[in-house]
Image (cartoon, rainbow, N blue to C red):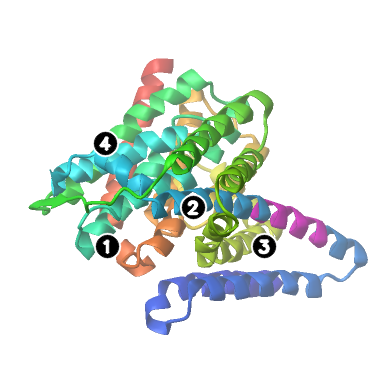
Amino acid sequence: MLETFLLTLAVLALLSIIFEEVTHINKAKTTLFLGCVSWITLFIAAQTPEKSALISEELNENLLEIATLWLFLMSTMTFVAYLNAKGMIQVMVQKIFPQQVSVRMLMLQVGMFSLVLSTFCDNVTATLVSLGLLTTFNLDSQMRRRMAVLIIFAVNSGGVALITGDVTTLMIFLAGKVHISELLVLFIPASISVLLLAVLFSLKAEGSVSTTPMAQSYNTVDIVIGVIFLITIILTMLLNVLFAIPPVLTFLAGLSVMFLVGRSNKSKDEEVQILEYIRQVEYDTLLFFLGILLLVGMLKEIGTLHLLTEVYSMYDPSISNFFTGVGSAVLDNVPLTAALLKADPVLTTAQWLGLTYSVGVGGSLLVIGSASGIIAMSKVPELTFVSYLKYVPALLLCYCLGYSLTLFLANHLHG
């Protein structure tokens, strides 16, 4: 009875996201409300002090994950908001991309740019920077939506090839299931599937677009802060690999350096302005994440994820991996991967690579399936849960191609 009620709350949360355009109730508010109600219900239903203590422990673990993600998002978004306001991202675009480019060529360039960037950066940073590119081009709403969908798929695809790009890739690597040299193979299917999606999206795209000319309003301090952002990204990767330092710690350190540089080079009024960039962070996005992760934590608590691992072991791993990826479009891929690693299925290297690809890219099939999608939904007004659905056939085709190529290459190399 309790499980049924809690699953109903999770379904209601999903429906509130789907029908946001009809109800006009912000999805962040509904998911946060239902997420909180689900945990309150768990506490009320606990019949013994021991059970309450156990639920409290699980909630604290869930909140720690959320707080880590919140602080990481906040620090990354502050950097991007600052560089965006100073026109630094637009300047970078004008250096990389031609001033006038055909829509088809732009689609390919944006797809590959997002793919490569997300291989080295985390998905959050890669999404924010890639979406920042879109603001510099005069695109109509439909094309902007298509570009945003391509960015989501490309960012998730790029993250699978290196341990710096995706948390699930790092988890599978740290569990000793794959080596870095084996992971690099995933860049080939990831690139081909992104290129296919870019081609599919550009079939009906005609004409050319130009970048919006930007008055260069930045000064030396802004360039220094841009360099700090770049160094922070590089150090985040290095320190995580070498000393297992959590990325959030390095990024917060980078953010503090940004504020210190701002303080030493600006007057009191201007220093306040640098701190103001924290306020430009979309708290709707953060609240939406909070609600979603509370619900996922609840599903983990009532054993839904454990049930999925049991279903996983009933079928051939190559088929199970494919559907695990599809499942990660609804459930967070991190607890899903954690549950599978805990179950420790006996898989070949090729099958572990297949799982790495599927849980990394499968979240792209729904806009709520990945951090990249949730950020894009809050940043691009044209992108909603329902409008994203019409791109699912193309996304599923590219996901199938990437997964098939992963298995083919992995089996060929380890056959």
Name which residue type carries label 3. Answer: Met
In primary-sequence order, the first of circles 4 and 3 is 4
Relative side of 302 to 47, left or right: left
Closer to us: 355 or 82? 82
Residue matched to label 1: 390
Q: Which residues are magenta?
A: 55-66
Relative side of 142 to 302, left or right: left
Kindly check if marks 1 and 2 are in contact, taking CB atoms under 8 A apart as contact.
no
The chief SS type of the magenta part is: helix
Q: Is residue 281 magenta?
A: no
Name which residue type carries label 2. Answer: Ala
Q: Where 43 falls versus 180 (above or below)?
A: below
Distance Cα–Cα, label 3 vs label 1: 30 Å
Which secondary structure, mark 2?
Answer: helix
**Residue 257, image x and y in percent?**
61, 41
**Residue 367, image x and y in percent?**
40, 59
Residue matched to label 4: 96
Residue matched to label 2: 371
Q: Nearer the viewer, mark 1 or mark 2?
A: 2
* The C terminus, quarter of image: top left
Which secondary structure, mark 1?
Answer: loop
Write the residue at 47% across / 45% down: 125
In primary-sequence order, the first of circles 3 and 2 is 3
Distance Cα–Cα, label 4 vs label 3: 44 Å
Badge 4: how crowded within 10 Å, few (<14), some, or many (20+)? few
Residue matched to label 3: 298
Name which residue type carries label 1. Answer: Lys
Kindly check if marks 4 and 3 are in contact, taking CB atoms under 8 A apart as contact.
no
